Image (cartoon, helix red, strand yellow):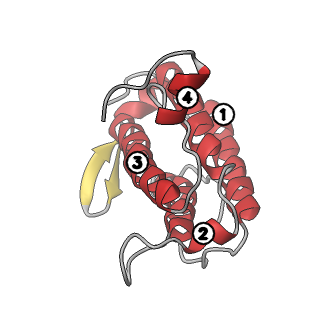
């Protein structure tokens, strides 16, 4: 749970940059990669990550601009990345202008529960990281390179002049 906006904004910057590394790697063709037969596709999952920023944060009354939670996933990877950039920028702008450290203790009705806003910010980051992990698996299945998030990805070890850990 965040008790101050500054640490969240620093975390969000890092997390958003990492999410964009993945979204910017997607191709239009890769968006059709399914999790499993009948499951979400890579494109739908990337769109869900994008939609969640305004969807979740607007339950607090923040007014984040972004795509509607019911909008269908586009067929363009660039459109998904652009929508993510816009929602992320709106989140930062709205938090910076409307919330203070004191507002993080306020509670909102979130999915039938009461969460204080510091918890909501934590869950936004964890939710994104969870789905980003799923995204990396689907990206590998689609033949796309994956960027390291909290350490080097397999391909990045060689770029660093090191042997990857044994599989």
Q: Are marks 1 and 3 in contact (CB under 8 Å)?
A: no
Secondary structure, mark 2, is helix
Q: Earlier in the sequence, mark 1 or mark 4?
A: 1
Label 3 belongs to which residue?
133
Label 1 belongs to which residue?
97
Q: Nearer the viewer, mark 4 or mark 2?
A: 4
Distance from disc 4 to disc 2, alpha carbons, whole Å, reads 24 Å
Label 2 belongs to which residue?
31
Q: Is 17 rendered above or below residue 38?
A: above
Label 4 belongs to which residue?
156
Q: Is 129 rendered above or below residue 12?
A: below
Name the residue located 44 percent from the left edge and 33 percent from the top edge: 103
**How far from the left and from the top, in percent, is residue 77?**
70, 63
**How far from the left and from the top, in percent, is residue 122?**
37, 37
In this view of the protein, can residue 117 be seen by the observer?
Answer: yes
Asked whether 128 or 68 is in front, the reply is 128
Secondary structure, mark 1, is helix
Q: Earlier in the sequence, mark 1 or mark 3?
A: 1
**How far from the left and from the top, in percent, is residue 3?**
37, 23
């Amino acid at each position: 749970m965040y008790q101050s906006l500054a640490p969240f904004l620093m975390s969000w910057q890092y997390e958003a940059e990492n999410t964009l590394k993945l979204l910017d790697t997607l191709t239009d063709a890769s968006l059709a990669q399914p999790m499993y037969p009948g499951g979400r596709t890579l494109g739908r999952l990337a769109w869900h990550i994008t939609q969640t920023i305004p969807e979740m944060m607007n339950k607090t009354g923040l007014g984040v601009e972004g795509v509607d939670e019911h909008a269908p996933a586009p067929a363009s990877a660039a459109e998904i990345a652009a929508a993510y950039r816009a929602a992320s920028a709106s989140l930062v702008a709205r938090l910076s202008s409307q919330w203070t450290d004191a507002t993080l203790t306020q509670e909102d009705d979130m999915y039938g529960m009461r969460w204080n806003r510091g918890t909501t910010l934590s869950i936004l980051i964890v939710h994104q990281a969870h789905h980003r992990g799923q995204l990396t698996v689907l990206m590998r299945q689609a033949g796309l390179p994956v960027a390291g998030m909290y350490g080097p990805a397999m391909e990045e070890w060689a770029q660093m002049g090191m042997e990857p850990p044994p599989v």
